Image (spheres, rainbow, N blue to C red):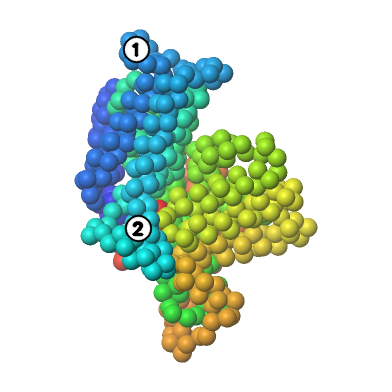
Amino acid sequence: MVFSSHIFLFYFLPLALILYYAMPRCGKHLMLTILSYGFYGWTNPLFMGLMLVSTLIDYFTVLILTYDGFRWTGPIPRLDPDRPRTRLQRMALIISICANLCLLGFFKYFNFGVENVNLLADALGLAWLRLDLMFKVTLPLGISFYTFQSMSYSIDVYRGQAKALKNFIDFACYVSMFPQLVAGPIIRFQDIADQLEYRTYSFEKFGRGVAFMSLGLAKKILLANPCGKVADVVFGTASVSVADAWYGVAAYAFQIYFDFSGYSDMAIGMGLMLGFVFAKNFDSPYKSQSITEFWRRWHLSLSTWLRDNLYYPLGGNRKGPIRTYINLAIVMLLGGLWHGASWNFIIWGGIQGFFLCFERLLGKQSVYHRLPAALRVAATFFIVLISWVFFRAPDLAGAMHYLGCMLGFSHVGENAALIGGIIYQPYYLLTFAIAAGITWLMPQTWDWTRVITWPKALIVILLLALALVVLATQAYNPFIYFIF
């Protein structure tokens, strides 16, 4: 079930809000957990069992960790951050992390591993090494997000940054909460622990949530989908002109931004409607003047998670410049692999890591830092577009061919001219221009919705109505981050 669907907007969400607010405070988490499991299992009920297994593992390992054994009486203590951990506590954390990574590794990377083993076997002429299996592993929706979120609970409690939950329903609610379950943002446990114990409800908070939800839906339906259609046509054409190739990848850049930031806005909005305050996940990333700044603005929940739970434990920048560059490269390569089981994602992470290392070598500034601000933004966007090719192309060969089209190295066939009649329609050009204007000229949703005035309320209502009307007529409505 996707947010931009009639069944969610007109049936599931209204019913969920009615049932949630009809419950007394002591039953709200149970109701929200039931609703979230129903939301998650809508496509495949078997996925619910997998999420429950992950939840149970982390719940019990953290209880063992916090009690330092099996002393199950009394309130759960908060661990002292400065006190050394016992062997049992370290083992409990290791079990939690390994269990989550094993689940993620098997379901997300098993097929990728088999394919590469077979390719290597064929290249070496060792047919007996091939793994000719009769089955393929299905990727459960959102497993990349809820495994990281569940691990955040174990890590935050182990570090003494939050207190463990004794009530299993509270923890299950945190892991499964449907607004951010299948495509983020990744909610750190330390950021929401207090809200699980007590949170406020108000018309102002609910109203801002409706505004977030409406603007996010408008981003998705009115901007991301048309731009995605252009990108699909261009990337699906065997060979295109230089202008068409750049137009196509720029359209994809707008699609992935408005698709994912729109989803994040909807998640934040529904969280507010339920009384929760989630952290900002995007901060106008295409306004960045360097790749370093880009990663301070793009997918903040992932970048901060990787920084705090991978980059810092590896040593961060505390062990000399060479080790710092190695740590940055490892983090970005693994960050790329986290997005998908493909060499394209690894290369995408490698490109990002290279520029992060290079800019750190220059004192955390880009090689073009002396240019005017507008040109610095343009240069950064150029680098991002190059990397998005690997993100969008179906495979490595397709990515290299598309880069050749962008640089004018590929032969343009006669049929390539036919796509101009599709991608340069006034509707798509207008959408592209509006997307560019909002990207670089308009304030972000987080700031714009801080105070909802009557003129803003009218704009929200009009955009929501327009998005719903267009949704009723659109056949193309993917949520691209579901596959990550």
457 lies above or below 236: above
Q: Quadrant of residue 101?
A: top left
Q: Residues within 10 Å of mark 1 (few under 14, many from 20)?
A: few
According to the picture, the residue beneath numbered tag 2 turns out to be 114
Please tell me which residue is depicted at 35% across the width and 9% down the height of the picture. 74
Q: Nearer the viewer, mark 2 or mark 1?
A: 2
Disc 1 marks a residue whose amino acid type is Arg
Q: Quadrant of residue 63?
A: top left
Q: Quadrant of residue 275?
A: top left
**Would residue 241 appear left or right of 52 to someone viewing this image?**
right
Please tell me which residue is depicted at 49% across the width and 69% down the height of the picture. 399
- Judged from the image, the secondary structure of the residue bearing numbered disc 2 is helix
x, y percent for residue 345? 48, 58
Residue nearer the viewer, 29 or 269: 29
x, y percent for residue 450? 53, 40
Q: Residues within 10 Å of mark 2 (few under 14, many from 20)?
A: some
According to the picture, the residue beneath numbered tag 1 turns out to be 71
x, y percent for residue 245? 52, 75
x, y percent for residue 413? 47, 87
Please tell me which residue is depicted at 54% across the width and 82% down the height of the picture. 410
Q: Which mark is residue 463?
A: none
Disc 2 marks a residue whose amino acid type is Val
- Of label 2 and label 1, which has the lower sequence position? 1
Task: Tell me the distance, in whole angstroms, between the alpha carbons under discs 2 and 1.
Answer: 44 Å
Please tell me which residue is depicted at 37% across the width and 45% down the height of the picture. 104
**Would residue 298 appear left or right of 238 to someone viewing this image?**
right
Residue nearer the viewer, 170 or 354: 354
Residue nearer the viewer, 364 or 87: 87
251 lies above or below 439: below
